[in-house]
Image (cartoon, grey):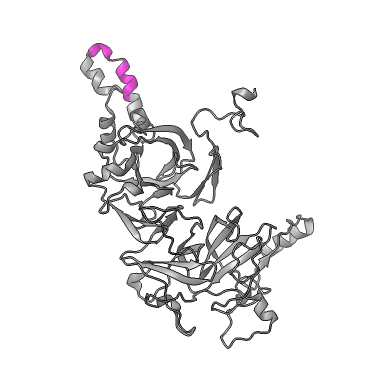
Amino acid sequence: MSTSAPLPRTSRKQPCRYLKEQQVQPQPRYECLQDQCEQENVKSSRAMLPPTRGSNVKPVVPYATSFPCSRSQEEPFSHQIKGQCVKPQSVPEASLMSSMAELVHDIIPQSTNPQTVPERIEWVNIQKCSNVNDRKRVVDVVVVGLARGYQIWARMENGNCREILSERQGPLRTGLLLSVDCEPSFGIHHDGFKGFRPLFALVDENTLIPDRQCCTVSFVSLLSAQFVHKINFASPVQALAASTKVFVVSFVDHIVILDMMSLREQRTICNTQIYEGSGTTPFAISDIFLAFATSELQQECQSCGGMGGEDIFQDSSSYSVVSVARNFTKTLTSFGNSVVSTLSASQQPKELLSSVAQPGIITVVDVNKLPVDSNISNIEYVDAVIAHFVAHTEPIGFIAFGNGGQILVTAGQSSTYFHVFLIHPHPGSSLLGAVRHLYRLYRGTTPAKVVSCSFSIDNRWLAIATNHGTTHIFGICPYGGKVTIRTHGGEIVNRESR
């Protein structure tokens, strides 16, 4: 794995995607839409890209240019040329004629023009980004992954949506917009990309070498639409995540942690649990806390709480058998204490855990305390553990932090139940910390895969989306308890407001 400085500026005839890393100025790679350019009758000798979003969309030139732009507070990226602008429109009311027309259109086959077929959307990611001119102002940024490229849109304060970047050079495996307000970590305080932020990290699937597909993480500046950094890895990248302090890259069986200031590798966590559904390690990041799934329970760092005792069996297929055996022992107490102790529910948590085939175990660590050569099986790793507990009776399939980093929601690979935990870390050791099991949320009986998860600002509402096309909304309390109108009304009601 290697890191690099900004890439060289080359002629536009070269494919900038496959250039070698050198210590020179960054080069343009991405196209920037130019409505003003067409108004000034600026002509290009390059072939124009075909329209991809309908016949009313103008084609664009596939290389970067620069235009002056006013530094108004309404524009979140002042140095970026203006692309398409979509104004808000009211939703049209359905009438009888429009309903009949849609019905006829669905029944009768229609001949379609290949040039007017809309491009398929593969994934969508909605994030918040601070305004470059005024950090107190926050705009919503929508990243759309397309079949042969991607688009980045920003929602302005007046309600309009402005196109920031548009690229058509192959699909992306994943993309993530990094925070503008970065904070020091791992003792690094100098921001090497201060003049280029906000940055967009992407994993490109379109490479010339098949063995090196998805092995590179590239960083593009939204201000100049240029490559500013690129990191090569030995294995394909599966997922990306970031906070204001660290940038996390997930692989099949390990996790790499980078600092946000220099975007260089700082720590590596190995021997993680692999999710069979996606072939990657489930993980979540909140500030400097990193939660990930592990395959072994380490007794030397196990925290109090989590799933234990009867909770383990209630989420497993053997719960019904154990329940019948427990009731049967109540009628056989006269035959001796040995029979009762064998069949009753007085087993130790360790014995209960051993009866489960492969439990889902969660480890939460402080990334700043990880050793340089960190490995989950080493005893030196214990000093960085914040919490280590059993979360499910099956392997972990999804992990997410709530706002604040204390609430953790987990799901097994079947995703039939979601568990909500409240983490109480201890400064001395993870053995002294506690993990409180707040809720066990039921989704359904059919297996599913969790696509995304989102908490409300006050952590009172939880929304979880699955690959079945459904979104489940749960009302929870950040500290547990029954959900009532007093806890989830228009305002939070306390004892003084009665």
Please say if 212 is above or below 453: below
Against 76, is 298 above or below?
above
**Magenta-drawn stretch, dominant element (helix, strand or loop):** helix
Between 109 and 196, the residue placed more toward the observer is 196
x, y (%) of residue 39?
Answer: 70, 80
Q: Residue furthest bottom?
A: 45
Where residue 304 sits: x, y (%)? 33, 31
> Residue 392: in sight, yes or no?
no
Q: What residue is drawn where x is 41% and y is 45%?
A: 414
178 left or right of 361?
Answer: right
| 194 is within the stretch colored magenta | no
Residue 159 in sight in this render: yes
Q: How many marks?
A: 0
From this viewpoint, which residue is outermost toward the top?
334
The quadrant where residue 97 appears:
bottom right
Residues shaded magenta = 325-335
> Is residue 403 positioned above or below 424 on the image?
below
Q: Residue at x 35, y 45 (%)?
A: 366
Image spot of residue 463 (x, y percent) = 54, 44
The N terminus is located in which quarter?
bottom left
Which picture quadrant has residue 60?
bottom right
Q: Nearer the viewer, residue 165 or 76?
A: 76
Q: Based on the picture, tell me whether residue 328 belongs to the magenta stretch.
A: yes
Q: Residue at image x 53%, y 35%? A: 476
Question: 420 left or right of 59?
Answer: left
The quadrant of the picture occupied by the C terminus is top right
Q: Left or right of 486: which side holds 363?
A: left
Residue 98 drawn at (x, y percent): 76, 60
